[in-house]
Image (cartoon, grey):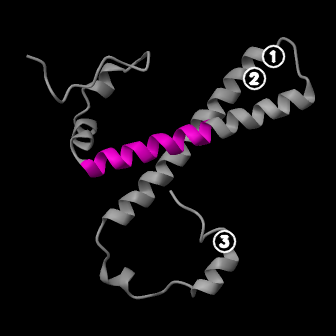
Amino acid sequence: MSKKNRIPKKVAGFKVPKSIRKSKPLKAMLASKTGRDILGKVLMAGAAAAAAVLAEERDEVAHAGKKGAGKGARAIGIAGDAMQSAAHAAMGVVTDLARSYLPQTKDEKRSTRQPREEAKEDRPFASSATH
């Protein structure tokens, strides 16, 4: 008889660390629909941010034609930048989603925000942005 709420040792060919597989908060998030929604959006945002860094670096290397002994060090730097960008994007998604699921307080219900027209001037693509 197998356990239903078990996280596999490998996902898509990559080993999942034991600390993640045994994580109680992660299991709790996977047990609820809201938690799975948040985790899915976090993974998508992180992957998109990392891919953007890698694509940008690929374009820079193609134009500059860099070669030589510094490839390993540069690759480590690129990987670090990609991970940092992915973590930053993931935390932004977690923050936004957490705020959207929490009930509003009395202070938030009082409208201290800018009118819609002024807000659109500050963020020109705000009306089309989605997470």
Question: Residue 74, position in %: x, y?
Answer: 75, 23
Q: Which residue is mark 1?
A: 70
Circle nearer the N terminus (3, 1) = 1
Task: Specify few, some or many for label 1: CA neighbours under 10 Å numbering under 14, 14-19, or 20 or more.
Answer: few
Which secondary structure, mark 3?
loop
Q: Which residue is mark 3?
A: 123
Residue displayed at 29% across by 47% down: 35
> Residue 5 lies in magenta, yes or no?
no
Residue type at numbered disc 2: Arg
Cβ atoms at labels 1 and 2 below 8 Å apart: yes
- Type of amino acid at the residue the image marks with label 3: Arg
Q: Is residue 7 left or right of residue 113?
A: left
Question: Circle 2 is placed at which residue position?
Answer: 74
Query: Can you say which quadrant of the picture contains the N terminus?
Result: top left
25 on left or right of 95: left
Using the image as rendered, state which of residue 90 and residue 130 is in the foreground. Answer: 130
Give percent across and percent down for residue 96. Answer: 44, 60
Q: CA distance from mark 1 to mark 2?
A: 6 Å
Magenta segment, principal secondary structure? Answer: helix
First along the sequence among labels 2 and 3 = 2
CA distance separating discs 2 and 3: 34 Å
Residue type at numbered disc 1: Gly
Q: Disc 1 on helix, strand or loop?
A: loop
- 10 Å crowding of disc 3: few (<14), some (14-19), many (20+): few
Q: Marks 3/1: CA distance?
A: 40 Å
- Most extreme residue toward the top is 69
**Bounds of the magenta segment:** 33-50
**Side (left or right) of 119 relative to 104:** right
Q: Is residue 35 magenta?
A: yes
Task: Report the mark closest to the observer, 2 or 3.
Answer: 3
Q: Secondary structure at mark 2?
A: helix
In the depicted structure, whether residue 70 falls above or below residue 117: above
